[in-house]
Amino acid sequence: MKTGIIRLFLTCILLILIGITVGIVVIQSRYITPVAQWTIQKIGLPEFHAQKISYQYPFHLKFEHVRLSQHQAPIQTVDVWVNPYQSTLNQLVFDSVLIDGLTLDNDQASFPQPLEHLKINQLAMRNLSVATADNLMIHGLNVQIQHPTWNATNPYLPDGDIQLYASQVSWQGETLTDLLITGNHQSQHSQIDSLTAKWRGASLSLQGKADGQRWSIENLTTDKLSLSLSQFQQLSYKFSSLIETHIAQIDRLDLLNSQFNMPRIQLNNFDLSLTDFHPAGTESLWKQNHAELSLDAESLVLDKMMWVEPSINLILTPGQFDVDDFSATLMDGQVHASGSITPETATIRDLQLQSIKMFIESGSEPDITWLASLIPAFKQVNVEQLKIRNSQIIQLARQPYWQLSGINTDIDHAQLLNAQRWGLWQGSARISVNNLSYGQFVVSQGLVEMHSQAQNWILDRLFLPFAKGYLAAKGQWQYGSKGAPWQFSVDADSLPLNLFKHLPLGIQGLADLSGSAQGLSGDAVIINHTLSGLLNLDIRNGRLQLPDTHDPKDFMVDAMQINADRGTITVPEIHLNADDLNATLSGRWDLTQSESGSLTLSVSSGETRHHYNLLAPKAEPLTPQPEAGLTQETSNSSTN
């Protein structure tokens, strides 16, 4: 009995050794490929095929030119490291699986799924190429996933801690290069710990997490991004709906050392930061709870106007942008502003311009009318405080040259735009200049003061002192009353006549005048029918240059009166006092009629009298009349 048991035990040991010997011989021989392939087909992959299978001690198997099924693309190599210590009869455990060289096309754009009784501790794939039905192209893809688990709802990528690198990713005409992602991929709650890539020559980094199909971007940073307006519009067209659908919130967005170009506008080397932003469609800017935007740039060029080092901080709340602070260097001066903007109203809390120097030269005239198409059609613009200090404007583009220097302005509690009409509709304004020059005409310490209250605009004071006299005016417009009555008064002493460049004859001299006018407003017809007033005018030291004469004539005018009565303006005939000139001045024109009027200068020369219409664009005499007849001719030229 005892001898039989010993023989049976020895027989079993011999069989085990023979099996091990046969197994070693098989896996080390050319028979390993058909044996292993037959075994794999029997345990669950009936279409499995490999051209070559090799074994490396102790637990490494290598499969070359593998095809899992007839419908899937071949894999160049698959390396498997078996873990015998974790494997059981019900589950085979692989420490690591490395898939190298696989192309997934439109019909196969998902990774192979393992058998249910197979567990993989680490899955690595390299040299993959992917092409999906929606034109996503991935080249040079390397993926490493710890403890991968497959989800039927997402066949593209198993769940697990992931590290992914792709040399190139292309979609919708955009390309990312050197894409590197580390994070955790789950069917509902994925997280990106780090994403870096190159895009349009800029570096890109991102962190975020997903809740279902919606992502929260914790941080998105780009460096050295350059875009044009057309490129920005193309990106918005391609990705705006995708962003609205899949991006719930952007905690922080940073654009560093970036460039933005559009027709007439260049934003150079700027840094932009946006926090707590919620994409919500085309009106998302007006629907933010409390987003903050800050921008600093090296320069901003608007047409030919350069803003140096502009800086702005914005707070976006429902239906309002709050400009917390804006500053820039403009034309050698400083600009500071704060305020708020709604879709219909702009409110300037504080605007200060210090030492601005504006030069207008030929070929460099600023043209900012095109900005109107970019600025919202506000119904109201309010100003709580506006200050301009020690600023200057010099116009050298065309003659007569002019300049304003030492400009100081204060506008307080004002409404400058009402119902899309500009004016001082509420508040007060004070404008003063140290010097004003217009050609040879120079004003020192000029001043304008006005205010508007209860729908009543009042010109409190206009005072322009010059070398030998002054010009003063006052006025009022009751635009809130019926008919909107207005009145205006003016006084001047020694006002140079050469200021009136539109006169067809060369006239020089000094004018003393005083007068007032009044009427109703509303439109041009009402003004023309209600204009009334009286202007008293004296001219001294006058010199008149007539056509076809070489020497100017000296003259004087005493107590000339210009009357206006309900749109009819008359100048009674008055003689010009001169030693060697026989001339009279008279005129009449009716603003209520379309017929032309005239202001006629009649000059007698010998037996002939010439008539000149001073309202005509040219100083051509009318048909001369014999002195005996002294017939007065009227001009057919249109009133200027």
Image (tube, rainbow, N blue to C red):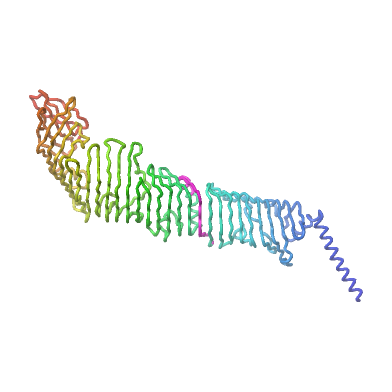
Would you say residue 71 is visible in this rendering? no
Q: Quadrant of residue 278 in the image?
A: bottom left
Tell me which corner region of the image, top left, top right, bottom left or bottom right, holds residue 513: top left
Nearest the viewer among 614 and 564 is: 614
In the image, is 611 to the left or to the right of 160? left
Against 548, residue 213 (above or below) is: below
Image quadrant in which the C terminus is located:
top left
Task: Please state the horizontal and vertical placement of residue 598, each as a whole percent of the image.
Answer: 16, 34
**Residue at 39% across, 45% down:** 306
Location of residue 208 with respect to 393 vertically, above or below:
below
Q: Measuring from the top left, give residue 309's x and y in whole percent.
A: 41, 49
Depth order, front residue of 414/623: 414
Task: Decide if residue 265 is in sight here.
Answer: yes
**Farthest residue in the bottom direction?**
1
- 95 lies left or right of 478: right
Task: Provide the residue span drawn in magenta.
Answer: 212-235
Q: Is residue 217 magenta?
A: yes
Q: Quadrant of the N terminus?
A: bottom right
Front one among 620 and 219: 219
